[in-house]
Amino acid sequence: MARKHEVMDWMPRRPGASLVILLAAVWAVLGAATADAQRALRREVPPSRAALQYSFAPIVRRATPAVVNVYVRSTSRTVRSPFFRDPFFREFFGRGFDRPRVQNSLGSGVIVDKRGLIVTNAHVIRSSGKADIRVVLADRREFKAKVILEDRKTDIAVLRIQADGETFPIVEFSDSDAAEVGDVVLAIGNPFGVGQTVTSGIISALARTGLSRNSAQVFIQTDAAINPGNSGGALVDMNGRLVGINTAIFSKSGGSLGIGFAIPANLVRLYVNSALTGRKVQRPWLGARLQTVTREIASQLSLARVAGALVVRLNMKGPAAKAGLKVGDVIVSVDERPVADARAALYRLATRGVGKEATLGVLRNRRRRDVVLKLQAAPGPTPDDIRLLDGDHPLYGARVSNIRPSLSDELDLEVSDGVVIIDVAAASTAQELGFRRGDVIIQIGRAEVSNVDRLERILAKSRSVWFIAVRRGSQILRIEVPG
């Protein structure tokens, strides 16, 4: 009986007191576990040396061995002019007036294949003459490299290190479509030629467009410091994987203002795969002309958001028309990923790849629907479409073609019919007069040029004066040349 009394004396006499004790214990444990967080909120001094040892060093050690410095030495002529072939001109200005000039440039690159495949920017290795390219690794080894793929439209180039039997460290690709604004990233490159440098920041924005003429180009924006020489370098995530290739900055001074841009890794990977397989990069053919939704368009269509890509023209034989798209539809997503504008929509299709399907989220009369689009390559010109122009006329030396969907996409043409210049022979009349690849010939004299057959018939007739109208981008140029 005494034992029972003792037990009863130990037990709390107030109802619920045991619950209070239990809650107090739990609160003490939680308080200890969140002490660091509370201290951080109060901006207190870290309590130990260990609290100061957070570092990006493990990521840097993983990624920097695969980031290289790229040095390009090329030759070009001081001045280019069609008059160089004139003996009087050369005698008057001096025979050395057009002598070759050595140019040196530098940039960065990223090794993405153990056999020595390097990704960089096309503008890093671009040259008007033969270029000597050397790459220097982080361990100071130096190798020659050669260009195996160059796409100036996307500003991507792929090099191969000339070193048989060597294996190299690499940076693996990440899924750049999974990146989010606010993710911490590191930029690695060779700014101003000072040597390999690492800077940190975050992803400031995704799917930035309007920074290049390429209709299917988008960029990742970051505030990690990027400067001249960083071009072609790596933008890596916290797993040390490649998020993008640093390519440009917004700056009024030439230095970093915290607004840098990188080509997304998912687009870069297409060109790396092309270099490895030897197959040309094929962009899916939509068969439609898209226009970015503006505030005015959104108001006219009673859209809730100023975002998306408006279908303004359809090729009735193209994939878009066959999938059921109509003029006036607004594409707002691709595979459930929202698109802000026309370029973002085309980019999503490009990274999806030919031979697959994409689900387009479409607004039609303000109602949402899904359209399944089969992604196929655009049909290109046949041998009958192409002519090398010969004869006594201003277009001598130009190779022209009827405009076909692949050419329209490749050259980013605003027209889908007519005749376009696809190449100009060196030292030809067409080159001396300034005609370029991508020029669309629309009129000669009063005769409209609708196809290559008609163009050849027009050029076969001699004229005292040639009046030629060409479309170059969004401009119409009119050229007058004596016959």
Image (cartoon, rainbow, N blue to C red):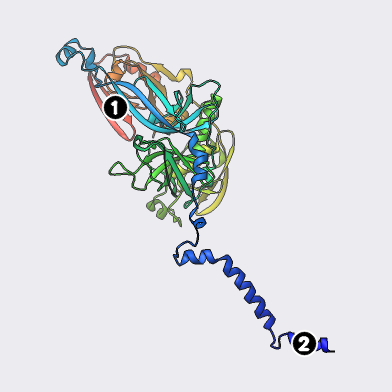
- In the image, what residue occupies the spot 49% across and 66% down? 39
Q: In this view, does 254 lie to the left or right of 244?
A: left
Q: In this view, which residue lies farthest toward the left?
A: 92
Q: What residue type is labelled 1?
A: Ala
Q: Is residue 375 left or right of residue 105?
A: right
Q: Is there any visible trace of residue 437 in the rendered image? A: no
Identify residue for label 1. Answer: 469
Characterize the local packing of mark 1: few (<14), some (14-19) or many (20 or more) Cα atoms within 10 angstroms.
many
Identify residue for label 2. Answer: 8
Q: Is mark 1 on a helix, strand or loop?
A: strand
- In the image, what residue occupies the spot 34% across and 33% down? 473
**Relative to 242, does residue 369 appear above or below in the rendering?**
below
**Relative to 336, does residue 441 appear above or below in the rendering?**
above
**Which image quadrant is residue 69 in?**
top left
Q: In this view, does 19 lie to the left or right of 165?
A: right
Q: Residue 422's x, y, as percent?
A: 39, 23
Q: Nearer the viewer, residue 481 or 436?
A: 436
Q: Is there any visible trace of residue 444 in the rendered image? A: yes
Q: Residue 176's x, y, as percent?
A: 51, 43
**Which image quadrant is residue 299 in?**
bottom left
Q: Which amino acid does label 2 sit on?
A: Met
Q: In this view, which residue lies farthest toward the top?
A: 87
Q: Is residue 242 left or right of residue 464?
A: right
Q: Nearer the viewer, mark 1 or mark 2?
A: 2
Viewport quadrant of the N terminus: bottom right
- In the image, what residue occupies the spot 54% across and 36% down? 319
Viewport quadrant of the C terminus: top left
Q: Do the residues labelled 1 and 2 touch (CB within 8 Å)?
A: no
Q: Residue 477's x, y, as percent?
A: 27, 29
Q: What element carries label 2?
A: helix
Chain-order first, disc 1 or disc 2: 2
